[in-house]
Image (cartoon, grey):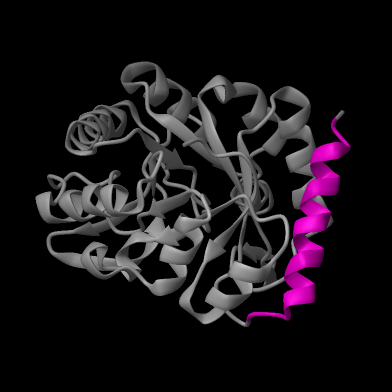
Amino acid sequence: MELRGLGIGWRAEIDLTVERLPGVDFVEVVAEHIRPARLPESLRVLRARGVPVVPHGVSLGVGGADPLSPARLAHLADCARALGSPLVSEHLAFVRAGGVEAGHLLPVPRTREALDVVTENVRRAQDALPVPLALENVAALFGWPDDELTDAQFLAELVERTGVLLLVDVANLYTNQVNLGLSAVEALDRLPLSKLAYVHVAGGEEHGGLWHDTHTAPVPDAVLDILTELCARTTPPGVLLEWDDAYPSDAALETELSRIAAAIRRSS
């Protein structure tokens, strides 16, 4: 089973909406929100229709120095098996240290030393999972002072070392462009898009000169422009809309999917 076309993030609050939205080719579910032994009925309905479901982890902590939790890895593996998923996705993020949870997906220090640590973590995760792993670039409100590489350079070298797939979030590229001055187009030129698994698109909000990737608003045109730039460089297997709170009407979500489809078409 392969990802293709347009997708949307499945959430329990909009389960029936996701089921009835036209043109949804695949969905993604936050792995920490489900139990593999007792899948939500809506996900079973979608699977019976042949809709691929990707478990998307938010707490593995690939970017941390602590060893990866065997229990968290086992849960991701069990989710993939229960859903018949083609892959598992997670974030290139730092989420805890010394038993203290950050409560946020924090950027990894982009140093050679950190790259060695992340490389080992990714290899361990790949060994524990029954399907390929894709890593997502995260949105950042700050950068670490000792960064030696850009986010794209860090990811590119990680892919070269491990063969891990990429989940490119164009909204996060936009966030880092606004907040850190990192050019989204330059990032697209440096990322190994031949290893692209799929793409995330989402809306956010500006506060005090910083862009917050809230997943609670329509996708800005500037983010769709980055999607068009990505599609001019490669054909993504799938593009998925994330919406995590303040859910709009079915019609509004359908409009967002249509806007994403139009941005993809503009690249041809």
- Answer left or right for 144 relative to 224: left
- Identify whether 91 is placed above or below 38: above
**Residue at image location 22% in from the left, 36% down from the top:** 121
Q: Nearer the viewer, residue 9 or 37?
A: 37
Q: Is residue 136 visible?
A: yes
Q: Nearer the viewer, residue 241 or 113?
A: 241
- Answer left or right for 130 relative to 187: left
**Residue at image location 69% in from the left, 52% down from the top:** 178
Q: Position of residue 263 (x, y in %)?
A: 83, 45
Q: Position of residue 157 (x, y in %)?
A: 41, 21
Q: Position of residue 112 (x, y in %)?
A: 32, 26
Q: Position of residue 70 (x, y in %)?
A: 11, 49
Q: Nearer the viewer, residue 10 or 247?
A: 10
- Answer left or right for 91 relative to 32: right
Please provide the residue range marked out in magenta: 247-267
Which image quarter: residue 253? bottom right
Image quadrant containing the C terminus = top right
Which image quarter: residue 108? top left
> Is residue 108 magenta-colored?
no
- Answer left or right for 126 relative to 66: right
The residue positioned farthest toward the top in the image shown? 160
**Residue at image location 51% in from the left, 54% down from the top:** 140
**Residue at image location 21% in from the left, 65% down from the top:** 37
Magenta: main secondary structure equals helix
The residue positioned farthest toward the front in the image shown? 48
Q: Is residue 215 visible?
A: no
> Is residue 257 magenta-colored?
yes
Q: Nearer the viewer, residue 47 or 114?
A: 47
